[in-house]
Amino acid sequence: MSSAKHGRRAAPKPPARLRTRSTRESAPHSARRDASATPAPVRTAPKPRTRSLRPAFSVIAMTFVGGMMIATSVPALAITATDPEPRASVYAPVEDSITLAPQTIEVASEAELEPMDSEGYAVEAAPPPIFSEVASVGSVSIVESDAIVWPVVSWEKRASGFGPRSAPCSGCSTFHDGVDFNPGNGTPVMSIADGVVVLATEDGGGLGVNVEVQHNIGGELITSSYAHMQYGSLQVSEGQRVSAGQQIGLVGTTGQSTGPHLHLEMFGADGARFDGFAWLTEHIG
Ligand SMILES: [Zn+2]
C-alpha cells in the first residue's frame, strides 16, 4: 500500500521536473545568452559545456534511479511508461526514455467465480431458545447453557440417593425424588447450569427455602430445584438469569429436613423427577 502511495505521489513532484526540463531546454539557450553576457541563473553560469554534461550525466543517473523506482514502486496503470506526455519523464526525459511494458495480470479466460457452497460451511446450529412462562414475570426465553457444574463443592459427600427409601421422618416420602448433598451447613449452593430462575421462595413448604431454575440443555427444558436452604440466604429472584456456578443460596435445613443438606431435584418438561446425581455425573464427566 505504501509503495502505491509513494509511486503516485512521486510522479508530479515539481522540483525534479523543473530540473529535467532545464537540462534539455536551457543548454542551447544559455549558450546563446552567455555570448550576449546576459546574467544567467546560478545553474546556467559560465561553462555551458561542462555544465550541460554534468546534468546530462545526472539525468542518466536519475533515469536509472527513476526507472528502478518506477519498476519497483509503481502499481500497474498508475503511470503508463509509454505515455507521450512527460508525466513519467520526471525521471526519464524523452530522449532517454525507458519503455516499460505495462504490467498486466494474466487470468485464464475459463476462470470463473464459483458460487460459494454455503452448506459446506454449515455449523451445527445452536438449539433455539426455549420460551417459558414464569408466574411472576411472564414469558422468558432460555438460551442453551454453555456449562454444567455440580451444585456444591464436596459434591461427593451425599447423604441420600435418588429412589425408594425408608422414610427418614414421619411425613417424609418413601420415594426420594431428589439427591441429598451433604457438604456442610452454610456451604454456597450454585446453579448447575445457565438458566432462568422461575421460583425463589422462603416458603416452599416441605422444601423450605427453595429455588427452581429452568435450563436449556441441548434444546431440552430441564429444571433444577434446590431445597432446604437457609432463611435469608437467597441471592436470586424470580425471572433472573443465572449462569452455571452462580451462587443462589446457602445450604440449610429449612422445611421438612432432618439436618443441613441440599436436596436437589431435577425434572424435564413432563415434571417427572429423575436421578440428578446420575445426570450430573454423565453431563459433567
Ligand atoms: Zn432430599
Image: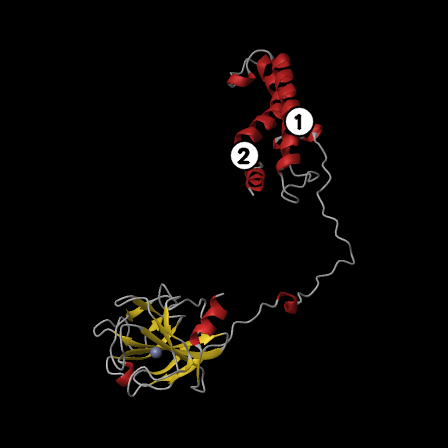
Q: Residue at x 65, y 39 (%)?
A: 85
Q: Earlier in the sequence, mark 2 or mark 1?
A: 2
Q: Nearer the viewer, residue 127 or 253?
A: 253
Label 1 C-beta lies within 8 Å of the nearest ligand 1 atom: no
The amino acid pointed to by label 1 is: Phe
Quadrant of picture, ligand 1: bottom left
Q: Is residue 233 left or right of residue 190?
A: left
The reply to whether residue 40 is in sight is no
Q: Nearer the viewer, residue 99 or 195?
A: 195
Quadrant position of the N terminus in the picture = top right
- Quadrant of the image occupied by residue 216: bottom left
- Residue at the extreme left of the image, as rendered: 232
Quote the CA–CA distance across marks 2 and 1.
17 Å
Residue 64 image label: 1
Residue, disc 2? 13
Q: Position of residue 217 (x, y in %)?
A: 47, 74
- Quadrant of the image occupied by residue 121: bottom right
The reply to whether residue 82 is in sight is yes
